[in-house]
Image (spheres, rainbow, N blue to C red):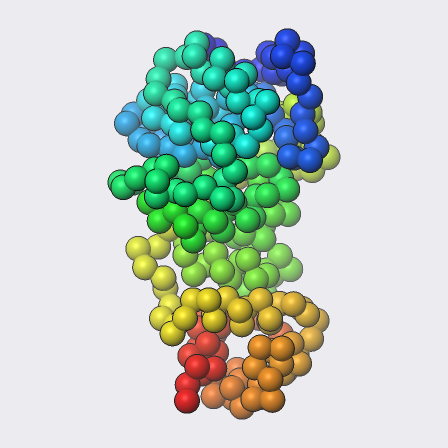
Amino acid sequence: MALLTPATVRSLLSEHGLRPSRALGQHFLADPNTARRVVRLAGVGPGDRVLEIGPGLGSLTLALLESGARVIALELDRHLAPVLEHVLSAADGDALVVVEDALHTDYRALLGAGRWRCVSNLPYNVATPVVMTLLEHAPMVETILVMVQREVGERLAASPGSRAYGAVSVKLAYFATSRVVGAVPPTVFVPKPKVESVLVELVRRDAPSVDVPSRDELFALIQAGFAHRRKMLRQSMRAALGDATVDVLARAGIDPKARAETLALDDWATLARAASAP
């Protein structure tokens, strides 16, 4: 089957009495060239196992199948799933549609062992939690290429000191490397969003790049530090470290007057070790 165009996307929606859901952040990819570009940037080839989250009407799914990949398409919208299955039934390839919430999926049961890729056009409203859920709970997914809102993508790939750098940037760096690999204009979607999108590539590390007593405690410190971005660490970290804040920062060699956005992952790890020391 040919890849979907704006005309075919609108026709499918009309034929099945569907409208894009604002609540679910649905913007359907409707450009074959963009779909094939995403697959190419993801490095997907024959025999690869690909998890696609939020497949919608199957624009990207068809391009993945065209490359020879085996696809599990995880779709939340139960009204959309039968249309997706209809579209994929006319295509050559191995695709399974699963109606489930990506934020609450048992990925070990769904994917099993072995290496997986994730290639997805993520709904704008859940892009960040979906990425973090995959990193935390789907270790078999080794590479991720996601299409997300530009602001979200820049935050995922941000470096210390940049305006977009935040708690998510640091937590992501614990699990993976990340970079923005391309821009996507609003014109390739139906309906057309009011914002630009970017493609972000994440490659899972073989092991975390820092050693800390507890990942949960590390993440709690990061969250506390970024809860009040404009405050110095001696103030913002009090919620997590209490009266010992200045002493812990000193043991970690971190300036109490610094702000959270200036600290790299290594600095946060050093702080976590200092906080857990007797």
| Quadrant of the rendered image containing residue 189 | top right
Left or right of residue 25: residue 160: left
Closer to the camera in the image, 91 or 102: 102
Q: Residue at x 60, y 89 (%)?
A: 243
> In what quadrant of the picture does the C terminus appear?
bottom left
> In what quadrant of the picture does the N terminus appear?
top left
| Quadrant of the rendered image containing residue 256 | bottom right
Q: Is residue 179 visible?
A: no
Residue that extends furthest to the right in the rendered view of this protein: 194
Numbered-mark total: 0
Residue 164 is situated, as x and y percent measured from the top left of the image, at: 62, 57
Left or right of residue 31: residue 190: right
Residue 237 is situated, as x and y percent measured from the top left of the image, at: 60, 78
Q: Is residue 189 visible?
A: yes
Left or right of residue 53: residue 209: left
Closer to the camera in the image, 138 or 230: 138
Closer to the camera in the image, 236 or 164: 236
Q: Residue at x 56, y 82 (%)?
A: 241
